[in-house]
Image (cartoon, rainbow, N blue to C red):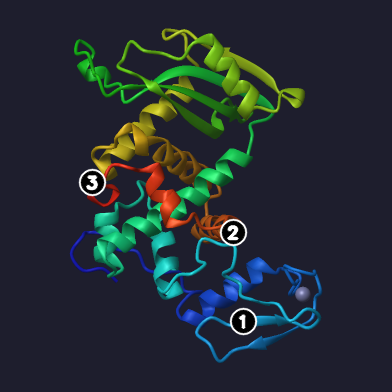
Amino acid sequence: MEVNTGIIVQPLHRYNREQDCMEALIAMKWPNGFVCPRCAYTRCSQLTSRRIPLFECGKCAHQTSALVGTIFEGTRLPLLKWFHALELFLLPDGISAMRLHRVIRVTYKTAWLMLHKIRHAVGEFDAREILSGDVKVNSDTYGYDPSRCKLSQPHASAVIAGCTVTESGEPEQVKIQLIPHKRGRENRATRHELTAFINDHVDARISEVHSFPLAFQLYSPLRKVVREAWVSLKSTYIALGPKHLQAYLNEYTLRRRLYLLGAREAMHEKLLCLCVAIPAIPYSQLIMHHPSRPLSAVA
Ligand SMILES: [Zn+2]
């Protein structure tokens, strides 16, 4: 599939044609058959003469497609390229826009936008999924390199990491939240910020929460995940500024969670499902998140 970037990922066999991708999106959008988004009527006629099939409600005549309200809405790209991009997004360390543009043969700008739309969906999904059960919370540092412990490390960032744990004590669902104004290895989240994280991201009614506010007494399996996130992200994206970092941390923790599902098909299906459930972010909003010349970013 791929020419000169060293990445070989064959698209899933289920999705060989544009029609396969469209049928998968229609099935995901309306698992129990068509439902009009305006009046909830369930009968429709289908206009198949267009590139994207339109469904016209049999009651109010509202026309819609399976792409409306998903990250694919308004796209001019073949869905096959989108599906291939989702596959590559699920590589163990993800994929940079520079590589994606070469592999699926779109412009760099298009590749950058596709990845940020996927990341936006991932971030929205992550925000809705709160931690519950046996929950551990660390006040940690992202980007701290222990092999250079005598240096000041100004790019290290304070983070709060939280996770649910399996019976054997391994982190299962993980969240890593950047404390954006706290840079440098000495800067850490306060107890107040730790409490705010727990209020926002943990279902306190049904959880037992252990928090670890001290640098030398962190929950070590969770600290290991934060280190792995740093190693993975820097291997793919080289340099990430603080403006971009939270989206990439969300990307990392979601990918890690999808990997716990095991099978590649299940991971792809889950990622596709959340891309269908979350509306695309408009371009104007996307660049507001990244005001400093987004298209020149390394990633
Ligand atoms: Zn209707």
Give the percent coordinates (x, y) of residue 242. 34, 32
Question: Does label 1 or label 3 sit earlier along the sequence?
Answer: 1
Image check: 195 left or right of 256?
right
Whole-angstrom CA distance, mark 1 to mark 2, is: 20 Å
79 vs 137, nearest the viewer: 79
Question: Does label 1 or label 2 sit earlier along the sequence?
Answer: 1
Q: Is mark 2 within 8 Å of ligand 1?
A: no
Q: Judging from the image, what secondary structure is the residue with disc 3 in? A: loop
Query: Which quadrant would residue 59 be assigned to in this image?
Result: bottom right
Q: Judging from the image, what secondary structure is the residue with disc 2 in? A: helix
Give the percent coordinates (x, y) of residue 149. 23, 13
Decide: is 6 above or below 54.
above
What residue is at 20 percent from the left and 17 percent from the top? Answer: 148
Residue under label 1: 54
Q: Closer to us: mark 1 or mark 3? A: 1
Whole-angstrom CA distance, mark 1 to mark 3, is: 38 Å
The reply to whether callout 2 and callout 3 are in contact (CB within 8 Å) is: no
245 vs 273, nearest the viewer: 245
Q: Identify the amino acid type marked 2.
A: Cys
Residue under label 2: 273
Q: Judging from the image, what secondary structure is the residue with disc 1 in? A: strand
Q: Residues within 10 Å of mark 3 (few under 14, many from 20)?
A: some
5 vs 244, nearest the viewer: 244
The reply to whether callout 1 and callout 3 are in contact (CB within 8 Å) is: no
Whole-angstrom CA distance, mark 2 to mark 3, is: 29 Å
Residue under label 3: 298
Q: Closer to us: mark 2 or mark 3? A: 3
Decide: is 196 above or below 48.
above
